[in-house]
Image (cartoon, helix red, strand yellow):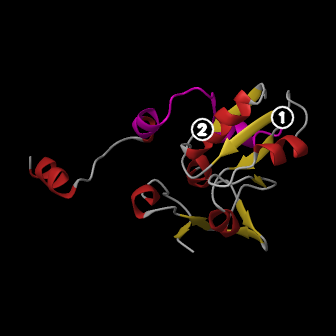
Amino acid sequence: MVLIVFGIVTGYSQESLSELLKKHNTNAVPYISVQELAMPKTQAVILDARERPEFEVSHINNAMYVGYNNFDLEQVQTKIPDKNQTIVVYCSLGIRSEDIAEKLQKAGYKQVYNLYGGIFEWKNADYTVFDDNGETTKVHGFSKEWSKWLKKGDCVYE
C-alpha cells in the first residue's frame, strides 16, 4: 500500500515498454525485434530518426541519419530509390521512428519496419553502438523521463 501511495505522489509508474508503445503508437508500421535486426540474414537499410546530437553520441552500425524534426523525404528517396528495399527505422524507444516510418510507407516504400524499443532496447540486449571513433558504451538518454528505459550502457545528454 505504501508503494502505491508513493507511486501516486511521485507520478512514477511501473509501465512496461509494451504499454508505453501502445499508448504512443498506432501500430501502423510493423515492429522488428533487435534480435531479428542483428541477424546476419537481415539485409536492411537502417535509418536513425533521432536528432543529430543523439546520433553523434552513438548509433547502430551503418545507420543513416535522417532525423526527426528536419526529416527530408526527398533526400531519403534519392538515397534509397528502390521502394522494395527493406528499411528499419529507429529512435530512442520506437515512437518517433514510427512517425518517420509512416511517412516512408505513404511515399510508397513497401518493407518498412519500426525497431521495437529503439536504440535503448538494442543496447539493453548487449548489441554494440558506435560513434565517429568506433565502438562506444554511450547512448543519448533523450530525456530524464525516457532514459529510465535504458538499462545498459552509459546514459548521456550531450
Q: Provide residue 122's location: percent of width, then percent of height.
A: 62, 50
For the residue pair 1 and 30, the one nearer the viewer reads as: 30
Q: Residue furthest left?
A: 1
Left or right for 100, reference 111:
left
**Element marked by disc 2:** helix
Q: Quadrant of the C terminus?
A: bottom right
Residue type at tag 2: Glu
- Residue at point 45%, 35% (across, down): 18
Left or right for 53, reference 133:
left
Residue type at tag 1: Lys
CB under 8 Å between callouts 1 and 2? no
- The answer to whether residue 93 is magenta is no
For the residue pair 27 and 42, the one nearer the viewer reads as: 27
Q: Is residue 36 above or below residue 128?
A: above
Q: Quadrant of residue 144?
A: bottom left
Find the distance from the CA under tag 1 to the CA under tag 2. Answer: 23 Å
Q: Is residue 49 above or below residue 29?
A: below
* Residue indicated by mark 1: 41
Q: Is residue 108 above or below residue 3?
A: above
* Residue indicated by mark 2: 98
**Element marked by disc 1:** loop
For the residue pair 26 and 148, the one nearer the viewer reads as: 26
Left or right for 36, reference 21:
right
